[in-house]
Amino acid sequence: MLKRILVVGGKSCAVLVLSLTMAVFFCGACRATVPAETYRALQSRLVRDGYSPRVVALAFRSVPAPMFHLVCSTMRTGRGTPNYSHFVAPSEIAAARRFIADHRNCFREEKAEYGVNPEIIAALFLVETHFGSFTGKTPTLPVFASFAIMDSKANRDRVWWSISPQDRATWGRGAFDKKLLDRSAWAYRELCALFELQRTRGMRVASLKGSYMGAIGWPQFLPTSLVKYGVDGNGDRRVDLNNCEDAIFSTANYLRAYGWCEARTRAQKEAVIYNYNHSTLYVQIVMAIADRTAGHRL
C-alpha cells in the first residue's frame, strides 16, 4: 500500500503523510471492534416501523460488531465467473435422481397441489445446497444489520478506505455510495422480514443461520421470500427450510407464483428460474440438471 501511495505524482509531502496515516487507520477497519451504539439508529428505525422495542432489543442483545469485512468482500471488483459445470457430472445427476426417488411421496403431494416438476426442484436443491448439506453457518440477522447500516456515510467511509486502491479506482466514490445505499435499502427490507417472521410465525430471528448473504435453508430463500412463499410441508405447524418437506413445498410455491405452471416454452421456463437467481449461467445449469434427471426435455 505504501508503494502505491508514494508513486502518485503531484502530492506534497504533507498530503502523502496524511494519505498514509488514513490508510493505516482504516487498514483492518473492516474487522475492527465496533461499539454497540453502531446499531442504535437501526434499532430505533425498526421500532418506529412498528416492531416491539423489547423484541428488537433482545434480538440485538447478542449481535456481534457489524461485519464490515463481509461488506468489503462484496465490493471487490474483478471477480471470476462462477463455474457450475461439475453439477452435471454423472454422480451429481445420480444424486438428484435418488433424491426424487427417496422423496417420491412428498413430490407426489407437491405435484398434485402446486404442479411443479420434481426434477426442477431437485436441480435447484442440488445447486443451492447439495440437498441441504451446505446451508451456511453465518448468523442471518448480523448479515442484514451490517448492510443496513451502510446508509450512514461514516460506515461507508470505513468500507471505502478498507477496499483496495484498485477497487476504489474502479468503483469511483459516487457509484460506490449508490451501490451501498441500494444494498442498505435491500438489507433493511430483509431485516424487517426477519422480524415479521418472528412476529407472525414465532421464529427466533437471532438464532437463524444461513449463507454469507443471508439466504436460509435448502432452497436458500431470503427472508422476504420465506414470508411470502414459506409452506408447512410436513404438517408440524411451522415452516423450517432446513426440513426437506417444508423446503420442497415452499420452493414449489415460489415457482408457481412466478409462473412455472403457465410456462409452456423453454424460454418461459428459463425466465421463471431467472427470477430465482439472476444469472444466465445458473439458469442454464439448473435446466440442464433437470433435463438429465428427468431423462427428457421439460
Image (cartoon, grey):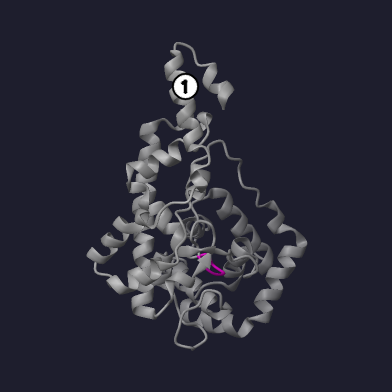
Q: Residue at x 58, y 67 (%)?
A: 120
> Magenta residues: mostly which secondary structure?
loop
Q: Residue at x 52, y 50 (%)?
A: 279
Residue 275 location (% of width, % of height): 45, 57
Q: Is residue 128 above or below residue 231?
A: above
Label 1 CA crowd tier, 10 Å (few <14, some 14–19, many 20+): some
Residue 211 location (% of width, % of height): 54, 60
Asked if the stretch drawn in magenta spans residue 217, the answer is yes
| Amino acid at the residue labelled 1 | Val
Q: Residue at x 38, y 75 (%)?
A: 198
The one of 287 and 131 positioned closer to us in this rendering: 131
SS for dot 1: helix
Write down the residue under mark 1.
17
Asked if the stretch drawn in magenta spans residue 170, the answer is no
Q: Is residue 224 above or below residue 267?
A: below
The one of 148 and 115 positioned closer to us in this rendering: 148
Q: Is residue 133 in view?
A: yes
Q: Residue at x 27, y 61 (%)?
A: 44
Number of numbered tags placed on the structure image: 1
Q: Is residue 64 above or below residue 168?
A: below
- Residue at the extreme right of the image, as rendered: 91
Q: Is residue 228 in view?
A: no
Quadrant where the C terminus is found in the figure: bottom right
The one of 187 and 221 positioned closer to us in this rendering: 187
Tell me if 21 is positioned left or right of 51 in this view.
Answer: right
Q: Is residue 235 above or below residue 14?
A: below
Magenta extent = 216-220
- Residue at the extreme top of the image, as rendered: 10
Quadrant position of residue 148: bottom left
